[in-house]
Amino acid sequence: MKLRTLIGAYYFDGWAGQNKALAQSNEPWAENAPTHLTRRMVREFPQREPVWGWRDDSLPVMEKQIELAADHGIGFFAFCWYWHDNGRGLNEKEIMADPKHTSLQLFLRAANKRRMKFCLLIANHGGYQISGMDNWHRAGAFLAPLLANEQYLQVGGKPLIIIFNPDGCDRRCLAAMDDAARQAGLPGLAVSGCGNATLEKGFTLRTHYAVVPGYEGGSQERTYAELAAATRASWGAEASQQYMPLVMAGWDKRPWEGPDGLNQKQGWYYPDRTPEQFATLLRDAIAWLDAHPGQTPAERIVMIYAWNEFGEGGYIAPTRGDPDAMYLRAVKSATTPGA
């Protein structure tokens, strides 16, 4: 009998706080724009607006998201988490005040939070990198109370942490973070890196955040079939390293490109995705688990990019363009027999 699959979805918390640049534009719709909303999103991609609006920084909206995710077979959110060091070491005040941690705090307060688990993806990229063994130890100590939460996801009996950029740490850094967790009474950590996360660097697990051919390759329209093929080609790890396959829900970051976006460089985009194509890719990822039982955790985890990357075009949360939540229904159909 095949074990059930545990589906996780990355959660990007860019829909709280204030986009100060837009607020100064004197456009009425921009007065309350969250941090990552752009003029291009509103004018050219209005179909991406979630059914609850662009902002998600309220408890009722979080509880609605938990309800929707759990009802459709998603077992946990992987919240992006951002270190603040400013060259001085951990800055707890700034970490707690970062609007990109708003939804994590709301999740912990949600009345229905027991319907799902959660874990952290340490962003560890430009402006938020953790540098040096001492800071990795501090990060482990700071996060320990959160990792001990009863809803925190465990893999192999240990709290799971995913690290976005494995090039920013090595075996000694990960050992320092693990040591801090053990000192706090935890059984150690299960640490997965995205992309080039090798056993030699100390990662016992590997996955991806996103698989994107042509990230800055100039503006080119491509097909979701190409994106799905590249995603399938990324699945796998060394025989002694566990792997959690990724499923790309889409990629199209045009709303963040150029001066009316976030000034990102142009790249390939894949605008023809459908719920049916997405469901097929998800079923293929589950089939990969079936075919490689020795290379994946016993929890049989599949990661989805993403729950709400509306700016980058990878999202399954219901929107104005998908008010009937067809992408969530695709998750349920792929993971629930007879659904």
Image (cartoon, rainbow, N blue to C red):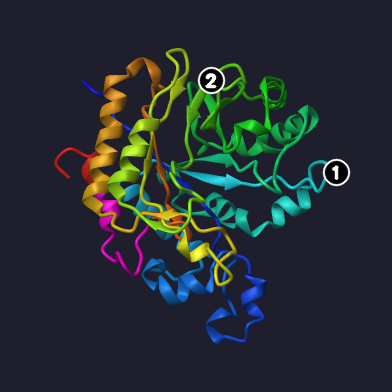
Is residue 225 among the parts visible in the rendering?
Answer: yes
User: Measured along the vertical axis of the image, is residue 52 above or below residue 287?
Assistant: below
**What x and y, as percent, mark residue 202?**
61, 20
**What x and y, as percent, mark residue 211?**
44, 41
**Quadrant containing the C terminus in the rendered view:** top left
Q: Specify the farthest residue to the top.
A: 240
Check disc 2 and give the amino acid type.
Thr
Say which of 311 and 177 sits in front. 311
**What x and y, as percent, mark residue 186?**
63, 25
Reading the image, the residue beneath label 2 is 204
Q: Earlier in the sequence, mark 2 or mark 1?
A: 1
SS category of the residue bearing label 1: loop
User: Measured along the vertical axis of the image, is residue 219 above or below residue 44?
Assistant: above
How many angstroms separate mark 2 from mark 1 (CA)? 30 Å
User: Measured along the vertical axis of the image, is residue 58 above or below residue 194?
Assistant: below
Reading the image, the residue beneath label 1 is 88
Q: Is residue 55 magenta?
A: no
User: Measured along the vertical axis of the image, is residue 176 above or below residue 90?
Assistant: above
SS category of the residue bearing label 2: loop
Is residue 73 among the parts visible in the rendering?
Answer: no
Say which of 136 and 252 sits in front. 252
**What x and y, as percent, mark residue 231?**
36, 38
Say which of 69 and 293 sits in front. 293
Category of crowding for the residue at label 1, using alpha-carbon neighbours closer than 10 angstroms: few (below 14), some (14–19), many (at least 20): few
**Quadrant containing the N terminus in the rendered view:** top left
Magenta part of the chain = 317-330
- The residue positioned 56% from the left and 40% from the top of the image is 120
- The residue positioned 55% from the left and 30% from the top of the image is 193
The quadrant holding residue 301 is top left
Category of crowding for the residue at label 2, using alpha-carbon neighbours closer than 10 angstroms: few (below 14), some (14–19), many (at least 20): some
Q: Specify the farthest residue to the right.
A: 88
- The residue positioned 69% from the left and 21% from the top of the image is 175
